[in-house]
Image (spheres, rainbow, N blue to C red):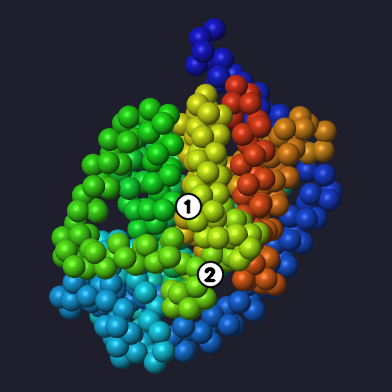
Amino acid sequence: MTATAQKASRVETLTHQRALWQAPHYVRSLAMAIPAVFLGFQISGWVFAMRALQEGRVDFRAQYTAGYLVRSGNGHRLYDHAFQLVLQNSLVSPRSVPMPFDHLAYEALVFAPFSFLRFKAAYFTFLAANVAALTLSILMMRRWTPTLNHIYAWLTPVMIIVFLPTAVALMQGQESVLLLLSLVIVFAFLGSGRDFLAGIVLSLGMFKFQIVLPVALLFLLWKKWRLILGFSFSAISLVAGSFALVGREATRAYIRLLTSMSVGLHSAADQVRLGVPPAAMPNLRGLVVGLLGNEVPGFWQQLAIAILSILVITAAFWRGRHMSAGHKLLIAVLAASLSSYHSLIHDMAILLLPMLVLFDECIAAIPDGPSVKRNVATAAGLLFTAPVLFCFAPTSFFIAGVATCTLLYAVLRWDGHSQFSYSVSVTEVVSS
């Protein structure tokens, strides 16, 4: 029997075993109760979001203004805080500090059409676009979660919708849902062997380069050359186009902005000005800053963050070498979410992809299956619930990063030679 036939036979056996699995009563009960509770949090969250929208205090304020600047021929002032403040107060609502646009300039072109509308109309139009992107993500991911579908047909869509980071991204008018869709498409392309296209789609997420670049780095270490070729070709074009759009002085201002948001973000004044308290970040940076606080000088904090990030990337590379291309992506997303230097709650929306696929793969091990698979399922469930901490301790949200660490650790402990059954099934899904 050939290796391909053996793999197909193993996938068929695993699929049959999961089809026969009956979820324990407590699993089915939790599958109903937890989403219902989270839906309650979301309802109250949308009430506050609509109030914030009336006052112009949503993140979409920055994207909307950036789109207007580019459309009006003022791209060179895209990173001019003083001018942004004047424009935001004029177009949206009065505030004492601007909400800075901190992404590559090419993203402002996406928001330029929305700037033809008034702010609130533009917000709801972009919300509709985000909902459409989320719907497409749901339709694709649902095909990779047969075990969850076996528990309840509605479970996968509901888990995606009530996941708190997803809701926050929708409420704030953030682009994290678009990045999630990009990663879902990359996962599908990798499963069907279209690595070059996967690289191009991955590069479209360069507006969150702090997440996308660690993913690309891991695929470079794994020597996935076709993906890297597609990524490099497109990413270089986007970066060069962004710098050409704003000019040399604005490019320097952008670099200064990134520096102030990273190594320079220590004072309370800077955190208020930029709206980025590190202790609210669910990543390694948040964990280091949140746990060490002001007890350790900034240099040593930066060093600790760098060392931990290298360790996470190295562990993901080493343990992911023998996994399928699709599951390399799942591990890369988890590692990138932790090692990204800038991450807030809405950025956790991308974790839906590894969380749901791995949860579906391993939940059938409950209660009597292999312990490594039960650990993965438990860690995925913990990650699903962890963002609710934001409702109670938003300034200490770094604690949620522990859940991502736990899932990554559980997956890396799962021997790559044990294999995941999706290396074949994803291809079948895409081709169908």
Q: Are marks 1 and 2 in contact (CB under 8 Å)?
A: no
At 65% from the left and 30% from the top, the residue drawn is 414
User: x, y percentage for residue 10?
Assistant: 61, 21
- Residue under numbered circle 1: 340
Q: Would residue 179 be visible to someone looking at this image?
A: yes
The image shows residue 426, relative to residue 418, as above or below, that is below
Q: Which of the pair 94/120 is nearer the observer?
A: 94
Using the image, tell me which numbered label, if any, was put on residue 80.
Answer: none
Mark before the other along the chain sequence, 1 or 2: 2
Identify the image quadrant of the C terminus: top left
Count residues near mark 1 (Cα–Cα under 10 Å), then give few for <14, some for 14-19, many for 20+: many
The image shows residue 278, relative to residue 229, as above or below, that is below
Q: Would residue 353 be visible to someone looking at this image?
A: no
At 39% from the left and 92% from the top, the residue drawn is 94
Secondary element type, mark 1:
loop
In space, the residues marked 1 and 2 are separated at their CA atoms by 15 Å
- Residue under numbered circle 2: 277
At 62% from the left and 34% from the top, the residue drawn is 412
User: x, y percentage for residue 353?
Assistant: 53, 48
Give the image quarter of residue 260: bottom left
Q: Is residue 75 found left or right of 341 in the rendered image? A: left
Q: Give the residue type at disc 1.
A: Ser
Look at discs 1 and 2 and give the one toward the viewer.
2
At 39% from the left and 46% from the top, the residue drawn is 213
Q: Which of the pair 116/428 is nearer the observer?
A: 116
The image shows residue 249, relative to residue 337, as above or below, that is below
User: x, y percentage for residue 354?
Assistant: 56, 45
Q: Give the residue type at disc 2.
A: Pro
Identify the image quadrant of the N terminus: top right
Count residues near mark 2 (Cα–Cα under 10 Å), then give few for <14, some for 14-19, many for 20+: many
Secondary element type, mark 2:
loop
User: x, y percentage for residue 210?
Assistant: 41, 53
